[in-house]
Image (cartoon, helix red, strand yellow):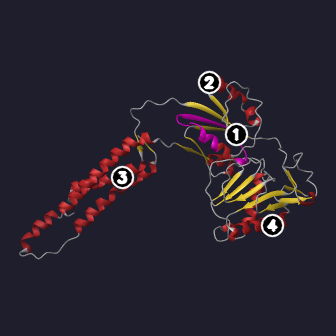
Amino acid sequence: MQFVEPFLLWGALAVSIPVAIHFWHQKQGKPLPWAATQWLIEKQQQQSRGFRLDNVPLLIIRCLLLILLAFLLAQPILNWFQQPPAIQKVHLVQPSQAVADNYKFELTDARKKGEKVIWADERLSELDDKPINGQPSTRFSALKLQTAINRLDTKNTELHLYLINSQKLADVPVISVPAKFSLHTAVDSAAQPRPYLVVKNEQKMFINRTGKLVSLPTLDPTLKFQSVPVHSGPIAVLLSYQKAQEQQTVKAALAALSDVYGFDFSIDDKPASNRSYDWILTDKLPSKPSPQTFYTLSGMAQLDGQANVMFTNESLTPQTSDRAATGQLPEWLGLQLLHHYELGLTNASLSNRDLQSLFVPTNKPTTEQQAGIQHGLLLLFVCLLAVERWIALTKNA
């Protein structure tokens, strides 16, 4: 027998409660007027030796109720008469040339065995008849990885993940994986060129060696940068909020970013039909998000979607947002923009401890696996509760 929440079985220790109540209850004497008490002294002394439990059937039923309740909360699964299912191995590979080259032997061997080898992209394209090398590297994120895992049929699956160990994986709190999974990570030792922006007055904006965002006339010659900037010139921004106060708050935050760090924003309060935007901040979900545009959506919960769409469940006003009330909104918006342009990413890798805490195995059973035993235990619990109430009311216990 297996349990979905086995730690709740500790609740079965509550069986000591009715036993303690029974011992305490029988010690509560009730004075009654009685004649010729002296003739009963000897009989009373004989009966008071040691401990004696009254209403033993009622005590047993109450103990069983608590044990049964602990079993119900722990959600048992009976698989005694089921044949062990066949486990299928699936190899999910980060769409990166470095990963494909590093694990070329393992992936080739998996394909020869007839196991699935799949790129962790939007299409989950397989590598059955394709050479492993030659797959172009794409922008990869932890959110894309989680989306790819969720789209897989992970039931009776042993998942093998092949990834680059980098700080990108820590963009989400946890990554849910099947109970049977293996993680294979490679470190990209090659010094990747750093991205940078060209902002006001041809200033170069980048992250220096100390991790600070700076704007200088020239790039640091001791660092390796990309041949072209990820963005040059004013950043076209569209503010489209239903609340005027939220519109003003976000506009003031962007003005603070421009004054302190030198961002070059070109802000529109209404969309122009002949203009494409680099950054759209709004409280309305776009019907067709553009892959070239970064979206910041406020006032709604996180939804599965593209990596260029960022959600916050609060409205960006001083009354509804701690960031806006404490003056942290400009910094937060700036971090989101830097993350979009990948200026703050480094080649640092996660430790083994961080990786273990990041990937959380889940083994939630299906409804069919739990329904039978849960319904039977619930029926037994209701029956025992009815019997307990009947005995308690009958004997006034």
Given residues 347 and 24, the one toward you in this image is 347
The crowding category of the residue bearing disc 1, from other C-alpha atoms within 10 Å (few below 14, some 14 to 19, many at least 20), is many
The magenta stretch spans which residues?
146-168
Looking at the rendered structure, the secondary structure element under dot 2 is loop
The residue identified by callout 1 is 163
Side of 220 relative to 267 (left or right): right
Residue 87, relative to residue 70: is it above or below? Answer: above
- Residue type at mark 2 is Gly
Given residues 173 and 135, the one toward you in this image is 135
Given residues 373 and 235, the one toward you in this image is 235
- Residue type at mark 3 is Leu
Looking at the image, which residue is at 52% across and 34% down? 156
Q: CA distance from mark 2 to mark 1?
A: 21 Å
The x, y position of residue 34, in whole percent, is 9, 75
Q: CA distance from mark 4 to mark 1?
A: 39 Å
> Of callouts 2 and 4, which one flags the residue occurring earlier in the amino acid sequence?
2
Looking at the rendered structure, the secondary structure element under dot 1 is strand
Instruction: Locate the C terminus and report the quarter of the image it occupies.
Output: bottom left
> Of callouts 1 and 3, which one flags the residue occurring earlier in the amino acid sequence?
3
- Residue type at mark 1 is Leu
